[in-house]
Image (cartoon, rainbow, N blue to C red):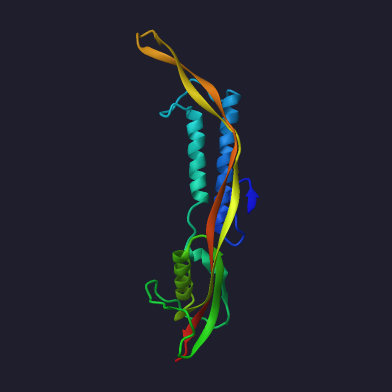
Amino acid sequence: MTNVNCGPAIAEDPMLRRLAIARSVSLIFIVLCELLEITDMIPKYSKNFFGRKTGIQILACLACVLCLGLSGCASVSSTSAYYLPYTTDVYPPKPKDAPIPILGKAPDRGYKTIGRLAFSTSQGWRFLRESMLYNARANGADAVLLKETSSRRETAIVNVPPRFNWIPVSGPACRDKKGNVCYNTTYIPDYQPGYSYPTSWTITGIDSEMIVFKK
């Protein structure tokens, strides 16, 4: 079990690194929001539709947009970085809908290995399958020979730092110069202690070869 402050991260999985960065950015924005509130840099009378302050809403939206961009799903085309060609011969790419069989054992007919695709990911078997098909078509392979698969569980401890929540409290009603009823709102700090929780995920790996059949 690993103890980390910003979520799990696996070296061979770029997606997990991006998720860890997104968690870190989110925590930084939370701390920044609280500092702005404590130092009165955000007016206490400014509220949004949730009852929180407009400045906090803007910062939260920025954090969400940034985190969504960082934690977006990895594309199968990015797995081309794990493809290792075995030959200098160039084979024409195949259409995107070209059928590519994934074989669990060597075929009976003659074939030539033109490259290898081997990597691990937390995206699951469907992502691995699509990655094999993508790289096979991109490199002109006739089939994929799946040599080995692996699966393991990874566990980490996520540490969430303490923070302050600001609870809006409405004061007594009053009337403005036009006779409209208004309420003065103040904000009371509510301390939330930090906590830790375990998280786990499955890492699946493949070791495959791209082959072309001999004519």
Q: Residue 59: percent from the left, percent from the top?
A: 52, 35
**Relative side of 179 to 209, left or right:** left
Residue 99's image quarter? Answer: bottom left
Along the line of sight, the residue nearer the viewer: 201 or 64 = 201
Q: Residue at x 51, y 45 (%)?
A: 66
Q: Residue at x 44, y 68 (%)?
A: 130
Q: Residue at x 60, y 36 (%)?
A: 194
User: Which quarter of the figure is the C terminus placed in?
Assistant: bottom left
- How many marks are shown on the rendered structure? 0
**Relative side of 207 to 130, left or right:** right
Along the line of sight, the residue nearer the viewer: 74 or 169 = 169
Q: Residue at x 58, y 54 (%)?
A: 155
Along the line of sight, the residue nearer the viewer: 122 or 194 = 194
Name the outermost residue toward the right.
3
Residue 41's image quarter? Answer: top right
Q: From what the image shows, is residue 51 above or below residue 77?
A: above
Name the outermost residue toward the left.
179
**Relative side of 102 to 116, left or right:** left
Q: Residue 187: percent from the left, percent from the top?
A: 51, 21
Q: From what the image shows, is residue 61 above or below residue 78?
A: above
Q: Residue 123: percent from the left, percent from the top?
A: 49, 60
Q: Is residue 141 visible?
A: no
Q: From what the image shows, is residue 215 above or below residue 139?
A: below
